[in-house]
Amino acid sequence: MKTYDPKRPHVSPLRVRNREFAWGSRTYVMGIVNATPDSFSGDGRPDRAAATAHAVALHRLSADIIDVGAESTRPGHQPIDAATESARLIPVIRDVRAALGDAAVISADTFKAEVFRAAFEAGADMLNSIWGMPDDLLDVAAACGVPVVITHNKAVAIYELDVVDEVVAFLEAAAQRALRAGLPAERILLDPGIGFGKLPEHNLTLLHSLPRIASLGFPTLLGTSRKSTIGKLIGDKPPAERVFGTAATVALAVAAGVDVVRVHDVAEIRDVVDVADAVVRGWRPPGWT
């Protein structure tokens, strides 16, 4: 794998509430809050108070972004309608905003336009969509002026051509559509969608090719946390025991120039990111001498 190239296309910093995300200077940590009873990783918190408390805990563990989702996307999951998703998601976002104020950057993990509009009104700052960026969703995001995460996904994991070529072409086309809709480049985050519509070998091929995705000229996000491909590589360990495998992918992501990593285990991955950023990007902690 080629490592991070500091000469990649420059993207302006992103400012959200009281935070600045200086793309290319650090790798930021997005913490996962699953307000759903059927999360693949076993960390679902359908109870509103429990989900809110977990979000607050992740923020205190130094998560840069809190990503709240209310619909499971695990293999074999049962889709839910917008009303059910909103009933789970909106109260948690509202409560997290009330608990943390402007100190927190909150992402809503949804691919339904009506759900995101309600989430934005409740206090969400950004949109994380696992199904690309359909026109109706893009229209709402552009109207709200929020950053978006655009993820590659497929209903069936069949690739007639090279998987990297297809993912890169999809992400590049989606990013250009977002630009035309009025979103500036610093608000368009591209995610190759590890585990979404891909077999394990597809996932490994994409992980090997992360620098190509990072070189597209937009911020990038990677979500490998506790996923099944990692489990298969380390003796079929259950999701809760995949933190070290996840850490390996995060270190490689930093080396490739990925800007955000979406993870369950914020404290552990923060250490991984800090050490990797110190080596790759020259970052140093405050007070370093």
Image (cartoon, rainbow, N blue to C red):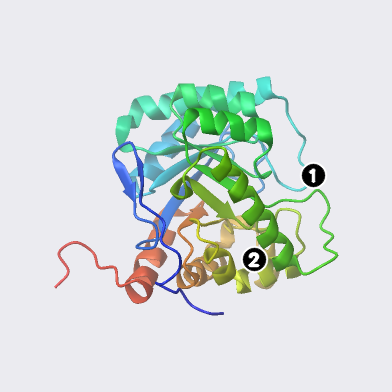
Secondary structure, mark 2, is helix
Question: Is there any visible trace of residue 36 in the rendered image?
Answer: no
Q: How many marks?
A: 2
Name the quadrant containing residue 232.
bottom right
Q: Would you call the spot at circle 2 few (<14 residues within 10 Å), some (14-19), or many (20 or more)?
A: many
**Which disc, if any, is residue 230?**
2
Q: Quadrant of the N terminus?
A: bottom right
Q: Which residue is mark 1?
A: 76
Q: Amino acid at mark 1?
A: Gly
The location of residue 138, given as percent across then percent down, is: 60, 35
Distance between the alpha carbons at the discs numbered 2 and 1 = 19 Å
- First in residue order: circle 2 vs circle 1: 1
Q: Would you call the spot at circle 1 few (<14 residues within 10 Å), some (14-19), or many (20 or more)?
A: few
Q: Amino acid at mark 2?
A: Ile
**Residue at coordinates 50% horizontally, 71% vertically from top-left?**
256
**Residue at coordinates 68% horizontally, 52% vertically from top-left?**
152
Q: Residue furthest front?
A: 180
**Left-right relation of 25 to 199:** left
The location of residue 196, given as percent across then percent down, is: 71, 53
Name the quadrant containing residue 281.
bottom left
Who is closer to the viewer here, 84 or 192? Answer: 192
**Left-right relation of 173 to 223:** right
**Residue at coordinates 74% horizontally, 62% vertically from top-left?**
166
Question: Is there any visible trace of residue 219 in the rendered image?
Answer: yes
| 276 is higher (above) or lower (below) than 181 | below
The location of residue 286, given as percent across then percent down, is: 19, 61
